[in-house]
Image (cartoon, grey):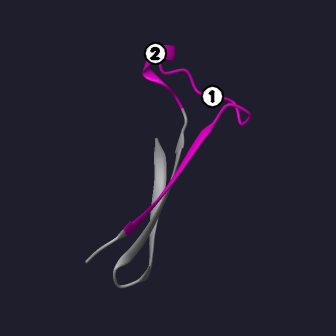
Amino acid sequence: MVGSSYTPLDKIRLTFEATLAESYDDYKFKNSNNLRWFSRVSIGF
């Protein structure tokens, strides 16, 4: 996985990730059509 986080405000963090390879596929790199993208919003109190 490769990703990045961005903090636009003091208590909010945005995270974006892409899966380049899977362990069940013997860690072969995926082409651009098969990439899996993830995003997450974290809010701190």
The region drawn magenta spans: 21-42
Q: Residues within 10 Å of mark 2 (few under 14, many from 20)?
A: few
Disc 1 marks a residue whose amino acid type is Lys
Q: Position of residue 14 (x, y in %)?
A: 46, 67
Q: Write down the quadrant of residue 36 in the picture.
A: top right
**Looking at the rendered structure, which numbered label has been put on residue 20?**
none
Does the CB distance between marks 1 and 2 fall below 8 Å? no
Say whether residue 36 is left or right of residue 22: right
In the current view of this chain or complex, which residue is farthest to the front?
A: 45
Tell me the SS state at disc 2. helix
Mark drawn on residue 24:
2
Indicate which disc residue 30 carries: 1
Between 35 and 39, which is closer to the camera in this rendering?
Answer: 39
Furthest-left residue in this view: 45
Q: Can you say whether 35 is above or below 18 in the image?
A: above
Residue 37 percent across, percent down from the top left:
58, 45
Percent coordinates x, y for residue 31 in the rendering:
69, 30
State yes or no: residue 44 in magenta: no
Give how far apart the Cα atoms at labels 1 and 2 are: 12 Å
Instruction: Select label 1 or label 2 by which is in front.
Output: 2
